[in-house]
Amino acid sequence: MSELPQYGKHLHPNAKMRAVVIDRYGGPEVLRLATVPRPVPQRGQVLVRTRFIGVNPKDIIVRKGKFQVATGKKFPLIVGHDIAGEVVEAGLGADLEEGDLVYGMINDFAGRAYAEYAAVDCQQVARAPSTIGLEVAAAVPLASQTALQALRDDARLQPGQSVLINGASGGVGVFAVQIAKILGARVTAVCSHRNVELVKELGADEVIDYGQTELLNLGEHFNVIFDVFGNYHFEKMKHLLTPRGIYVHTIPSARVFKDVARTFVRRQRAKLVIVRSRREQLEWLRQHIDGGRLRVVVDRTFPLGDVAEAHRYMETKRARGKVVLAVD
C-alpha cells in the first residue's frame, strides 16, 4: 500500500486506524477499507474517535474526481466530511476536552472523515446535541449548515418572505424547510409524491409534487428560490423571483459561476452556497435540535465496510433525509 498523505506533523508511534480510501477517482468500487497511520492533533485541533459519519453528495463528487483541481492526484485519499464522536486527545490551545461528545464537518475539499479517527480544528466542531444520539448527530453538520448558510447568510431570508425549496426531501432539503420556518418565512416545498407527507410534517406551508406540477408554470413569485436538487438554473427560474429575489444554487458548475458573476450588480441575483463548518452555527443548530424545533431525518445507516453500497444508494437520489455510516 502506498503511503497516505500525512495530515499532522507527527504520528503516534505505531498507531494505526481503519479508513476508507480511494486509489483513483471513479465509481463506488474505488472505495476500499485500509489500515493507515492515525493522525495526531496539531495546535487548536482535537483528535476525534468517530462513531458515525454522514454521507453527502459532496463525498460522491469528490470520489468521482470532479474536485480534483483542489483534491489533487496524491493517493490513497480519505474522503468524507461529517463526523460525530468522542474527543480522545486535545492539541495545544484546543478548547474542547477529552471525553467531549462532538459533531461537525471537516473543512477540506477531500474531507478525511471516513476513518476511525479524525484530527480536526476545534472551530469546525461543537458539542453534540443532548437530545439525539451520535448516529443522528452525524447527519447534521454539512447538510444543515448548507441550508443555514444558503438561506440566512446568502439569501438573507427575512420573516414574512416567501421561499421556494426545490428538492425538499433530501439531505439538505429537510433542513432547509425547517430552517426557513425558524427564520419566519413562508415555505413552498418541491418533492416527489412519496415524500409529500414527510415534507408537510416538517412544516412546509405548501408542498408541490413535481410529478404533477411543472415549476416553471407557477403563478407565484418568491423572494428566494433555493435549488437544492440543482436541475434548474437562474435564467430558467428568474421569472418566479420577485424584483429583488435571490436564487441560490448548491452545485458548482461553469453555468452557475457565470450566473453568479453576471448578476452580481443586478437586482435579481444568483448565488452559490459554499458551505464551511463554523462552531457558532453548529451551536445554533444544537439549540434548535435540543429545543425540539429542528428534526433530523436519517434514511439508512450502513456499516463502514459497506460504504460502496451507501454511495450507490445515495446516487439513486431516492434517500429521504440523510445516509449515515456506522464505524463500529
Image (cartoon, rainbow, N blue to C red):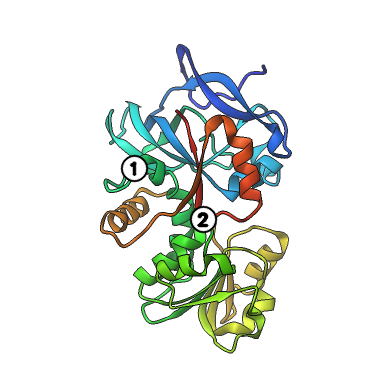
Q: Quadrant of residue 308?
A: top right
Q: Quadrant of residue 235?
A: bottom right
Report the front residue among 139 and 76.
139
Q: Which residue: 50% across, 54% down?
A: 275
Q: What amino acid type should be assigned to the residue bearing mark 1?
A: Gly
Q: Which residue is mark 1?
A: 133
Report the front residue among 104 and 31.
31
Quote the CA–CA distance across marks 2 and 1. Answer: 18 Å
Quarter occupied by the C terminus: top left
Q: Which residue: 38% across, 71% down?
A: 181
Q: Which residue is mark 2?
A: 171
Is residue 227 visible in this depiction of the protein?
A: no
Left or right for 5, reference 278: right
At mark 2, the secondary structure is: helix
Query: Residue 267: image x %, image y %?
Result: 56, 82
Query: Residue 182: image x %, image y %?
Result: 35, 69
Q: Which residue: 45% across, 47% down?
A: 139
Query: Residue 114: image x %, image y %?
Result: 53, 33
Quarter occupied by the N terminus: top right
At mark 1, the secondary structure is: loop
Report the front residue among 127 and 138.
138
Q: Which residue: 50% across, 58% down?
A: 172
